[in-house]
Amino acid sequence: MTLLEQTLHQHQIRVTAVRRLILSIFSRAGFALSHADIERQLGHDYDRVTIYRTLRTFLEKGLIHKVTDDAGVARYALCDLQKCNVESHADEHVHFKCVHCGHIFCLNSVDLPPLHLPEGYVWYATTIIVDGLCKTCKEGL
Amino acid sequence: MTLLEQTLHQHQIRVTAVRRLILSIFSRAGFALSHADIERQLGHDYDRVTIYRTLRTFLEKGLIHKVTDDAGVARYALCDLQKCNVESHADEHVHFKCVHCGHIFCLNSVDLPPLHLPEGYVWYATTIIVDGLCKTCKEGL
DNA sequence: ACGTTTTTTGCAACTAAGTTGCAATATAAA
DNA sequence: TTTATATTGCAACTTAGTTGCAAAAAACGT
């Protein structure tokens, strides 16, 4: 059994061809991927709906997480496999969107700041997306 | 000239019937509105496209700002009319999404926390959405 | 007040993202 | 290897949002 297949198993996801492929695409990607990105990389061997359903399964099983940028398109990135599993998701972190290349990156080294909400509001979770220039684009300008 | 009409003028937006109506809907709303919300409140007297274009105009002229929640639907809320105008937008603030009622609120009293990014990243803007229970829903549970 | 210029609106058509139901197929488990 | 269960492909659909163009409405100068 390959490493990718073990990962699927550990997240209680049955191993199939598309799932192996999509997981490997994620593990190679340095940034969050949209459905369209994955469809492009897979070629036209698999149905669009299958890709949507695979993403939903991966999400539900704690293998990937979702970021929605201001354009409203969902993007997904691998979770920290040490921290997230079927039971719980525990790698809240800041995302960075480069205004030049459009990619969204996970910033695992940036701490989530504490926010004190007005009286009466109950905190559940914080989502932060920072816009700016990424390393690569900054150097290329 | 009514107050609403003055506001439109100040933002260099020509006064028309839909615009007056949509602006008044916003000024009454206590939370961010989607296109669908506005369409519902307007009745079917105006075309969907007109509403989309009105929102875009209001956005461009600094009258409203946009928040996209994780479902990918755009919502809009009035800007602080003291701070924002045609030239510049200057009321960055935290948004709060209630998991119970689904509404998104502007939290003007919460400071945007400073974030220190990894080497090489250039900061342009920070977007924060806090999920939780709003005042009203908390009391009602 | 009147015609002209410039914006705005409605309509129709279209795109892109995402979902659902169902039958066929592939995986896992006995 | 058979059976039970989950996954896939296909077709159809929904919802959000966009574009082009002609008609209608504002604004502007006289």
Image: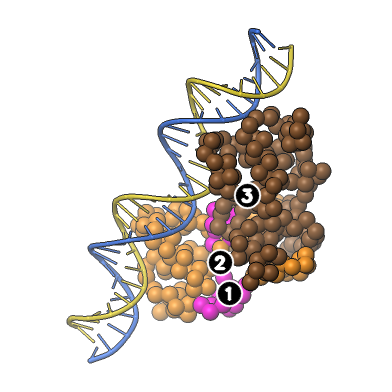
Chain colours: A brown, B orange, C yellow, D blue
Asked if the stretch drawn in magenta spans residue B74, the answer is yes
**Circles 3 and 1 in contact, beta carbons < 8 Å:** no
As drawn, the residue found furthest toward the right would be A82
- Nearer to me, B46 or B53: B53
Tell me what residue is drawn at x 69 percent, y 57 percent. Answer: A105
- What is the secondary structure assignment of the residue under circle 3? strand
Rendered view: A40 above or below B33: above
For mark 2, what is the residue?
A: B65
Alpha-carbon neighbours of circle 3 within 10 Å: few (<14), some, or many (≥20)?
A: many
Is A77 or B55 nearer to us in this picture? A77
Q: How many residues crowd mark 2 within 10 Å: few (<14), some (14–19), many (20+)?
A: many
Q: In this rendering, is residue A29 above or below A132?
A: above
- Labels 1 and 2 touching (C-beta < 8 A): yes
Report if residue A69 is visible in the image: yes
**Label annotation for residue A30:** none
The residue tagged with tag 1: helix, strand or loop? loop
Mark 1 sits on what residue?
A: B89
Is residue B113 visible to the viewer in this orientation of the structure? no
Q: Position of residue A88 (x, y in %)?
A: 77, 41
Amino acid type of disc 2?
His
